[in-house]
Image: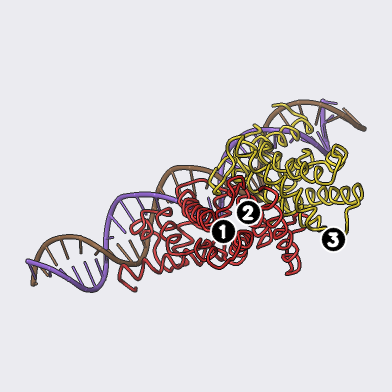
Chain colours: A yellow, B red, C purple, D brown
Amino acid sequence: MARGSTETRERIVQAAGRLLARDGYRAMGVNAIAEEAGANKVLIYRYFGGLPGLLGTLARAHPLWPRADAVVDSAPTLERALYLAVLETGRLVREQPIAREILLWELAERNEVTAELSAVRERETERLIEALRSRFSLPPFVDLPALHALLSAALSYLALRASDPAPTFTLTPSTDSDWRRIERAAAAVVRAAVGVME
Amino acid sequence: MARGSTETRERIVQAAGRLLARDGYRAMGVNAIAEEAGANKVLIYRYFGGLPGLLGTLARAHPLWPRADAVVDSAPTLERALYLAVLETGRLVREQPIAREILLWELAERNEVTAELSAVRERETERLIEALRSRFSLPPFVDLPALHALLSAALSYLALRASDPAPTFTLTPSTDSDWRRIERAAAAVVRAAVGVME
DNA sequence: TATCTTCGTCACCGGCCGGTGACATGGACG
DNA sequence: CGTCCATGTCACCGGCCGGTGACGAAGATA
């Protein structure tokens, strides 16, 4: 049924993305993906060389992380740009199931797939830092990478905890008002820290 | 061999802790634990009613999170106490493999075990917040839970990423000097934010 | 028409998983 | 002594996993 290499390839990639978003990274096996795609699992080996190849293809097909230029261009000050970048990271993790699962995956396992996924995000983040640095020419004693790492780690983690398997973190943001509190704290922190560290 | 219920129970609990610390939460199965303990897996069902019961016992036997009183008593100011509490959380996650794996587990799965583990940590954190509030009588418009959630989430996440499967986060702290940068950023943030939010 | 390649199917493998039922053993207690 | 029960052992189950070898069916090419 439905012969034709390219269509089948595409169907498998789509199915992998659907499965990752719906059932999480722990469900990503050749058997499950093949069934979801209505294809035969042998084709995963033939077309992608195995699971890592397939998931690499999937990752390359999705733009998952904040684009450096978009963030920088839309903000008038360093504080605002940093704030927006950090919040955008949290928002992506919260609203993009695939992004969320990839972060979890990277935390839980270390293999070819997660290494490549990390590298992709890393590259984009470095470009963001570089863009901020050149656009706003901040004083050298502001440790921008450290500040950015601290805040985006915070938002990512809170977003991870808030979604699907939802435990607590004293204030684990669940309602909109919870998230506003976190965002207000982050804003105050950014505003103050950039000044204080100078 | 080695008859006697209590000794065997203890041996199984010890083996579970060892396995969790060494091989991570993904390795925690009845077969693996039984082999590690040199016992028979049937006993896990007989003595603990199954895996959740065994791991609940294990968790209750380990003090894993910062004690509220210790942190509060050793700090002269609110800034200092908050800074110490947050750093201690990060340090624990970094140095206690069991704590690390429990956090990962809570992120990745939602079941009886992780629910109970979350509850334990949650209770301790609430006590910390309450102790800070009463000890230093901070103004009501400082959103202490939000600030604490933001910062401890940051340190926990960075510590999780820095250990065993070690990908990147632009600045993923690996060396001591990396961690000093993060700590300096956190200190500045705490100092500034408490003032700014007043 | 005959041949050859590509695409897809099917059946099977060994291995590990969680879980259970049947049975040996040894000690306490009558 | 005999009984009983907690303790520990062993073999086995069904199910899912990743992975592979053999085969059929469509279509291009000669």
Which residue is nearer to you in this view: C12 or B137? Answer: B137
Which residue is nearer to you in this view: A124 or A187? Answer: A187
Residue B91, picture quadrant? bottom right
Chain letter of mark 3 equals A
Residue receiving disc 3: A141
Q: Which mark is residue A108?
A: 2
Q: Which mark is residue B101?
A: 1
Question: Rounded to the nearest whole Å, what is the CA distance between mark 3 and mark 1?
Answer: 36 Å
Q: Residue A163's spot in the image, x, y percent?
A: 60, 40
Question: Rounded to the nearest whole Å, what is the CA distance between mark 1 and mark 2?
Answer: 9 Å
- Position of residue C23 in the picture relative to residue B142 (left or right): left
State which tag comes first along the sequence, 3 or 2. 2
- Residue type, numbered disc 2: Ala
Mark 1: few/some/many CA within 10 Å (<14, 14-19, 20+): many
**Residue at 85% across, 37% down:** A74
Q: Which mark is residue A142?
A: none
What element does badge 3 sit on? Answer: loop
The count of marks equals 3
In front: label 3 or label 1? 3
Mark 3: few/some/many CA within 10 Å (<14, 14-19, 20+): few
Chain letter of mark 1 equals B
Q: Is residue B144 above or below residue A13?
A: below
